Image (cartoon, rainbow, N blue to C red):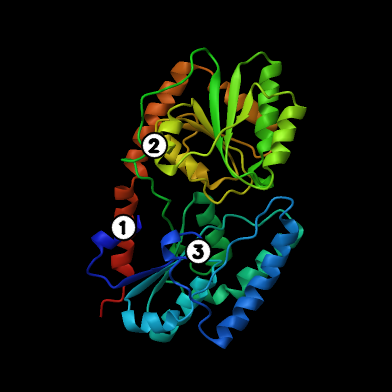
Amino acid sequence: MYEYIATHAKDIDLVMVVPHESRPYWQSWNFRAVTLKDKLHFRLAFAPYLLANKIAQKKMFEVPALSSYEGMNVWLDAEKPQLIIANVEHAPTTWQAASWCKKHDVPLIIQTELQRMPNEVLSKIATRIFLKVKKRLFTQAAHITAWTNQGVKFAQVQLAKAEPQKVMLLPLAVDTEFFKPHLRKRKSGKTLRILMVARFVPYKRHHDAIDAIANLRAEGISVQLDLLGKGPNKEIIAEYIEAKGLQSQVHMIDDVQYKEMPRLYAQYDALLLASMNEAIGVVVPEALSCAVPVIVSDTSGATTYIEQGKNGFIFETGNVPDLTQNIKLLCNQATRIRMGIYARKSMQKRFSIQNIGKQWISLIRSTARTS
């Protein structure tokens, strides 16, 4: 997407500020805080947020990666951009970008991945403090873009209540030329093969997926679940699989290079995302683009890509019987084929880089300071 924007908005002096933890090619930027005032604001905004999430990490959350850029104001002074897009709202880099934009009267677009208040009490309190401290950033922003439908609703109420019209839905695009259907290389037999790509951390809810497989086995339905990922809870999940006696039905598979992911998706009948409060779940649009139907939890941002019963199914997060029933709906091969075809077409029509890119270019041209 960044390449598409750079190609189609060459006449606009645009800067996109991205935390280097989330985009490797920014790692050469070793920036820090802009001013002492900003440093104090960083501490006020992020100290309680990180503390509460650290406490809650063992339950349902991960501590977000935070970074700031040293000398960013000097660099921006030299570039003199007409517009800055900052990703994401919790990053100190966004605060830095906002400070520069305010000083130089340059419009700012903030991308948010927030969708709802956390369930855990301490994290909820910390998030409220975080939003209050950063209120001026959201007020200053010319536009706030959200990746998901849930994100739009949250932003309109919590981030831009006075100006809900400046919140826009701009979903994460998928490269439909790279993620495309490949020749199916599934094993013979009537076993339904499901792939789950997720880090082994609590909020990914691997236990729910495994319990659903146990339910299906008890009903005499042949299902195989393959788990791909890394994380601190990998050994715990392995022990849970063994305790359930599901070693023949649930497997942990070896890491796959990113370039091989389309071929990996082609080996499966469906993709499963069971997470609690997943910001997006990028594997979902990737699988859909590869003509693989998906099953996703209702607190996942990936529901933005789902048309219930057409390209996938949405189940209630944490509700194992509901998940079990939705998996059973995909046991019919004709249903899977129909949904896979629709999934591919829907991704090409609505969520391709070209489609989402055009929306970004329109927003950039209407927002950039051209005078």
Residue reaching furthest front? 254
- Which label lies toward us, 1 or 2? 1
Earlier-in-chain disc, 1 versus 2 = 1
Earlier-in-chain disc, 3 versus 1 = 1
Residue located at (72% from left, 66% from top): 51
Whether residue 351 is visible here, answered yes or no, is: yes
Question: Residue 192 at x, y = what percent?
Answer: 54, 20
Residue reaching furthest left? 11
Residue located at (59% from left, 23% from top): 224
Q: Amino acid at mark 1?
A: Glu
Q: Which mark is residue 289?
A: 2
Q: Could you say whether the residue bearing mark 3 is in a helix, strand or loop?
A: loop
Please say if 234 is above or below 269: below
- Which label lies toward us, 3 or 1? 1
Q: CA distance from mark 1 to mark 2?
A: 20 Å
Residue located at (68% from left, 18% from top): 217
Q: Amino acid at mark 3?
A: Val
Which residue is label 1 attached to?
Answer: 3
Q: CA distance from mark 3 to mark 1?
A: 18 Å
User: How many neighbours does mark 3 have within 10 angstroms: few (below 14), some (14-19), or many (20 or more)?
Assistant: many
Earlier-in-chain disc, 2 versus 3 = 3
Query: Considering depth in this image, is 311 or 264 the residue closer to the camera?
Result: 264
